[in-house]
Image (cartoon, rainbow, N blue to C red):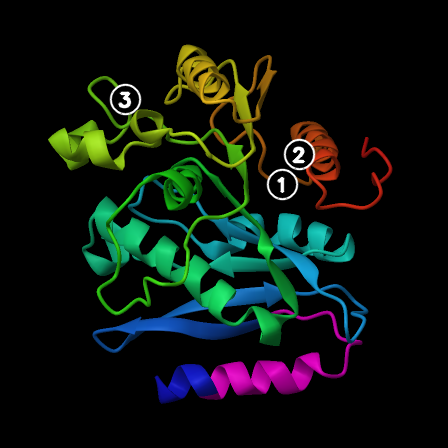
Amino acid sequence: MKRIISHLSLYILLLCSFEIVAQEKIIYKSIDSIDFYIEIHTPKKMEKKEKYPAMVFFFGGGWKSGSRSQFIQHAQYYADKGIVCFLADYRVEKSNNSTPFQSLADAKSAVRFIRKNAKEFQIDSDRLIASGGSAGGHLAAATALVEGYDDSNDDLSISCKPNALVLFNPVIDNGPGGYGFDRVSMEYKNFSPLHNIVKGAPPTIIFLGTKDHLIPVTTVEYYQHVMQKVKSTCVLKIYEGGKHGFFNYNKEDLHFYNETLNETNKFLKQEGYLTDLPPLLN
């Protein structure tokens, strides 16, 4: 805990200059002497009395592997647009011999940590967007929809529910026939976002390619249908020929990356997280 406070204090001192392009990382939790970090990317210039929207990204990898650097280009892009962005670590099977349930506990801890320190990060805790790809998309959605699976050390009085979701080919169905059922078994009824959509679910945008070998188009279409039944916004964007991970930054071919950013911008403008619509990316 002392180490977390020390890192946070250092970050606050840096933030007070209001001129940095932050790429700082701080510890948000420690488990068995292993530290888990959040990397923060802030706008170049932050007005002292302003509160900014926040966006936290969870990497993909089937809850088995992955790196928070997956969304670094997204974080840098949205920091430049006036959103304070966070890239979160969480436990994965390969490094931590962990379960998907522990991955979700960490994701919820990360959201709570961000909210708890909203004043220091200079963010509006009621304008917090969660995003992620594949299993990271599951974690983003599950922080909003799934009850339980909390870290026993968390302050549960702090909400882990984001106010909006940006999901890239997300693992939203963990039931029989869905991804991850072999690992979560009958817990899917409580763990699967698709099976836990309720009234008040936050506005959501989902991106999927037609050639995704893990997430069927029919699954996300049904997810959208259920969201509409509870009267929650759910924008669905399907990309012909897109494979799993099609949205990732690829300097050799930025087509899908740019297209999904353009649609995300429209969604965030519609939901009040961007004041102006950025120029289209080609």
Query: What range of the chain is rendered magenta?
Result: 6-23
- Residue under label 1, please give it: 249
**10 Å neighbourhood of mark 1: few (<14), some, or many (≥20)?**
some
Report whether 204 appears left or right of 157. right
Q: Within the image, what quadrant is residue 186 found in?
A: top left
Amino acid type at circle 2 is Tyr
Query: Whole-percent x and y of residue 136?
Result: 42, 43
Q: CA distance from mark 1 to mark 2?
A: 6 Å
Amino acid type at circle 1 is Tyr
Q: How many marks?
A: 3
Query: Whole-percent x and y of residue 129?
Result: 57, 47
Q: Residue furthest left?
A: 186
Residue 178: assigned label? 3
Q: Please, is residue 180 above or below residue 29 in the view? A: above
Q: Nearer the viewer, mark 2 or mark 3?
A: 3
Report whether 168 appears left or right of 44. left
Name which residue lies at 81% across and 34% down.
281
Quadrant showing the N terminus: bottom left
Q: Earlier in the sequence, mark 1 or mark 3?
A: 3
Quadrant showing the C terminus: top right
From the viewer's side, name the closer residue of 21 and 204: 204
Residue 217: assigned label? none
Q: CA distance from mark 1 to mark 3?
A: 26 Å
Q: Please, is residue 24 above or below residue 62 in the view? A: below
Pointer 1 with pointer 2, Cβ within 8 A? yes
Residue 200 appears anywhere in the view: yes
Residue 257: assigned label? 2
**10 Å neighbourhood of mark 3: few (<14), some, or many (≥20)?**
some
Q: Is residue 8 magenta?
A: yes
Q: In terms of secondary structure, where does tag 2 sit?
A: helix
Q: In terms of secondary structure, where does tag 3 sit?
A: loop
Amino acid type at circle 3 is Gly
